[in-house]
Image (tube, rainbow, N blue to C red):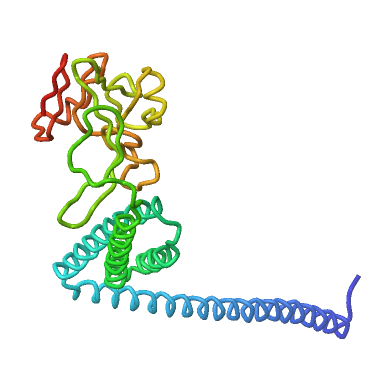
Amino acid sequence: MKLSKLSYLKLILFSLIGALTVTLSILGYIHYQTINDLKRITGNHAELSDEKLSLDEKLASISAELTRLQNVDQKLRNDELEEEITSIQKTYSSAVNSYESLLKLREKTTKTQSFDELLTDALVYLSKRNYASASATLADLDKQIKAEEDKLAATAATAIPANVPVNNAPPGSGYSRQQVATEIGNYMVSLVAADLSSTRVIVDTASEGTCGNDCPVLSLGDYVSRNGAFAGINGSYFCPAEYPSCAGKTNSFDTLLMNKNKVYFNGDNNVYSTVPVVIFGNGWIRF
């Protein structure tokens, strides 16, 4: 079929319009995508700029800290640390000694509230690392405890009943309560005298051998009764559980001793001992 010239021109025109429409659509899509890509790139650039700024600030802070550390006198710093450690050790040791002195005072009186408060103040200072104030408070506490001990001793000396005789010689035998006169005053004592030719003196222990911690203990009355004795006296002082310095060696004692079963105690830690010794034999005693 033959097309007229006019129809042919119309066909060409429609084809061009269609092609132009497709081209414009493609260009529009490309423009849209380009705009979106530009927005995304711009956003990423802003984020990267913020991150760079944050990193720059961190690097500047680290650099400043490094410079500060480089400028610190390490010897001075070590000396300060050593001084602080020494202060801690010294003040802690003083606190332990003061506390143990306070425990001994409580055995003689219940009026220790003011001393307890001073100890509490010292511990608070220690917790705040105020070692100077802690040391001063502990020194004051020790001074007051000593004054109270002296006061109690003086009171005890003046409280001796009037009917207790003054006698600096022991009784010939048996039990006696008497005053012993000294340069600093009279003291009341209780004495038991016995003839060694007819009296056996034994050394008894709660443990069967040397004990370093959590050692068994007995009262003086228990020792007397289990041996059928008529009198007894405490021997070595042991480390009470209440004392902080006794941690790890509760109820132990360090002095040399041989008990009635001929068991030798504390030989390892008394190789070069200079502690005085009392030896009981058959009818004799030696110091």
The location of residue 78, given as percent across then percent down, is 18, 64
The structure residue drawn at horizontal position 40% and vertical position 74%, both measured from the top left corner, is 55
The structure residue drawn at horizontal position 58% and vertical position 80%, both measured from the top left corner, is 38
Task: Specify the quadrant that holds the C terminus.
Answer: top left
Q: Quadrant of residue 219?
A: top left
The location of residue 156, given as percent across then percent down, is 33, 55
Going by the picture, which residue comes out furthest to the right? 1
Q: In this rendered view, identify the residue nearer to me: 224 or 110.
A: 224
Q: In this rendered view, identify the residue nearer to me: 256 or 247.
A: 256
The location of residue 36, given as percent across then percent down, is 64, 78
Q: Is residue 150 above or below residue 65?
A: above
The location of residue 146, given as percent across then percent down, is 28, 62
Q: Is residue 261 above or below residue 25?
A: above
- Give the side of residue 46 with respect to residue 263, left or right: right
Q: Is residue 236 above or below residue 210?
A: below
Q: In this rendered view, identify the residue nearer to me: 184 or 274.
A: 184
The structure residue drawn at horizontal position 27% and vertical position 35%, both measured from the top left corner, is 191
